[in-house]
Amino acid sequence: MQSGILRPALATYTALFLLFLYGPMIVLAILSFQSIDGGPQFPIRDWSTYWYQHLLGLAESSRVSQLPVGESLVRSILLAFMTTVVSTILGVMSAEAFRTKFKGSGPAFYLIILGMMVPGVLVGLGMALLSNTLGIGRAWWSTSFVLHVVYTYPFAFLIMLAIFNRFDRTVEEASFSLGVPPAQTFRRVTFPIIFPGVLSAMLFSFTLSYDEFARTLFTAGRDLTLPLSIYGTFSVEIYPNIFAFGVLTTLFSFTLLVIYGLLMKRFTAKASRFSGQEDAA
Amino acid sequence: MSAISTDPRATSAQTAESPALIRERKDRRRALGLLTPGLIWMALFMVLPMVMVIYVSFWTQTTFAVNSDLTTASWERFLSSSTYLTAIWTTLRIWLIVLVSTIVVGYPVALFIGLFVRNKTLQTALLVACVIPFWTSFLIRVIAWRPMLGTEGAINTILLKLGVISEPLTFLLFSEFSVLVGMTQIYCVFMVGPITFMLGRIDISVIEAARDLGASFGTVFRRIILPLSLPGVMVGSIFVSVMVLGEFATAASLSGRKVNLLGNIIVSQVGSLKWAFAAVAGVVLTIIITAVIALALRLVDLRKEM
C-alpha cells in the first residue's frame, strides 16, 4: 500500500515499540554483569560475572543470601512436565470430540475456555478454601498441578481444534474402508497429521505452567516452585543476582523454543520427503 | 434420514433405524466419551473452587479462622470499608487505562505488521519479535522495570546525561505510573496479535479499489480497515481485560504498595488468614470480570473468531 509518509512513520513507530518491549530486558541483562559491590542500578562499577557465580552457589558467602532456585527449579520442571502430558491428552481428546456435532457443544466449549479466562488468584483462592475444608494438604504436585491443567488445557484444546478444523476427514475414512483398525489408523494416519499441533500444544502447556505463578501462590503449600521463589524476593531489597537469574531463565526458554523449532523442522522435512516419494511413484 | 434404505443389512436389522442414524448416534456417544474427562476436570477443579469462594464469603470470620456459620458480616464489612471500596475503584480505573493504552500503543503496530508489511517472512519475523519477550518469566519482566524506572535507573541516567532534567524524576517508579507502564508493556502483545490477525485477512484489492475510486487513506481507514479490525480489538480486549483485572504481582512489585487492586486485597487477606474477607473480594472480582466478559461476548462471538 502506498501512502507517502504513513509507511515510514509506522515503521519507525514499530521499531520504537520493539524498543519498549525489549528495553527493560536489555537493561536487566546489562546490569546482571554488575560487580560485587554494585547495586541493582547504574552505574556499572565494573564488569564481572560475580552474580552468576553467586546464583549458582560458586561464590564465597556474601552479604546477600543465595536465591533458593535449585530445588524449586526441579519442582517447576516436573510440574510443567506433568501438566504438559495431562493437558495435551485432554486437549486432543476434547478437540477430537468437537469434530462431531452434538447438543450442548456450545456450553461445553465455553466451560473449557473459561479455564484460561478465570484469574489465577481466584481459582487459587477457591482451591485453597476447598482443600482447607476437605482437610487435604496443599502441595505443588497435587492442588497446584490440577489448577495448572485447568489453565493450560484450554490452550491445548484451542490449538488442536484449529488443527482438526483444517484436517480432511476423508483421509481417515479411506484408511478405515481399507480395513485398517482404528488404533493403527490413529498411529499411521491421524497422528502424523496432527503432530505439529500436538507439539505446539505441548510447548504452550509447558511454558505456561513453568511460568505460572498466581495459581500456585495459595496452593503450593510449603515447597516452593520457581516463580514463588522469585516472588519471595520482591518484598525484600533486590540484588543483581535476580537479574542474572532472569537472563539464565530466558536462555532456558529459548533452548526450549529451539528444540521445538528443530523437532518441527525435522518433522516437516520428513513429511515433504514422503510426499516427494509419492510424486515419484 | 427417512429415505428408504436399500442396504440389505438395514432391512434385515431388527431396528427400523437407518445405518446413518445408528452411526450418528455412535459418533455422538464417542464424542461425549472423549469430552467427559476434560469436563469433569473443569467441574471439579475450576467450578467447584469458584462455588467454594462464593460459599465461604458467607462464613463467619474469627481472628485466625473461619467457621461455616452463615452470615453476611464479611459482606457488610467489605461494602462499608473505604479501603475495599477504593480497591474496587482502583481496579476498574487501572483496567480501563491499561485497556485503552494497549489499544492505542498496539493498534499502529498491528496496522504496520498486518497491512503494510506484505512480505510473509518479514511479517512472521516481526510477530515473533513481539512474542519473544513473552518467553521470559512474567515476574522477571515485571522486576525488569525497576532498574529501568528507578531514580538511578536507565531512563533517569540517560535524561540526566542529556541534560533534559537536572534532578532525577521520582514519579517514574513506585507509583501508579510504573504500574501502568509495566502492565501496558506486558499485555500489549495480546492486543497486537489478534488485531494483526484480523488486518492480515483483509483483501488488499478492496483497499486498492477504494483508493482507485478516490478515497483518501483516512476514509479507507474509517470505512474499511477499522470496521474489519474491530473483532480483533474485541478479542484482544477480552484477553487484556481478564488478565489485568486478575492482576496483583505488577502492582505489588512496582507500586511500592501505593496501588491496591482487588487481587492485592485477596493476597494480603489470605496472608493474614482472613479467608472470608478474601472470599468476598474474590466474589466482587468475579462479578466484575463476568460483567466485562458478558459485555464483550455480546459484541463478538469468540467461537466464530477463533
Image: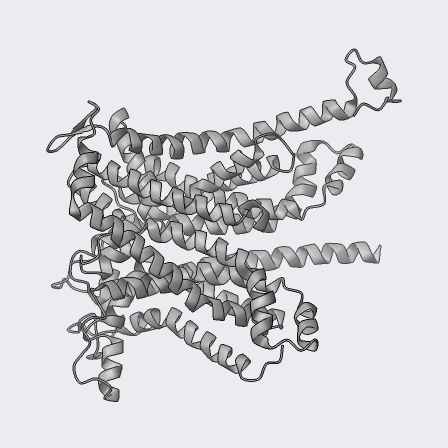
In the image, taking residue A245 as reference, residue B202 lies left or right, namely: right
The picture quadrant where one finds residue B125 is bottom right
Q: Which residue is at the front of the view, A142 or B89?
A: B89
Q: Considering only vertical position in the picture, is A47 above or below A241?
A: below
Q: Is residue A215 visible?
A: no
x then y, percent, for residue B16: 79, 14
User: How is colour applied across the structure in the image?
Assistant: one colour
Q: Is residue A19 visible?
A: yes
Residue at the (19%, 42%) spot, across then down: B269
The quadrant of the picture occupied by the C terminus of chain A is: bottom right
The picture quadrant where one finds residue B24 is top right
Please give the count of numbered marks on the rendered protein: 0
Q: Considering only vertical position in the picture, is B7 above or below B165?
A: above
Q: Considering only vertical position in the picture, is B148 above or below A253?
A: below
Q: Which residue is at the front of the view, A76 or B152?
A: B152
In the image, taking residue B282 as reference, residue A160 lies left or right, namely: right
Residue at the (53%, 43%) spot, across then down: A157
x then y, percent, for residue B159: 25, 83
Q: Which residue is at the front of the view, B73 or A264?
A: B73
Residue at the (23%, 29%) spot, across then down: B58
Q: Considering only vertical position in the picture, is A137 above or below A1?
A: above
x then y, percent, for residue B97: 34, 61
Q: Give the residue at the far bottom of this rendering.
A: B163
The quadrant of the picture occupied by the N terminus of chain A is: bottom right
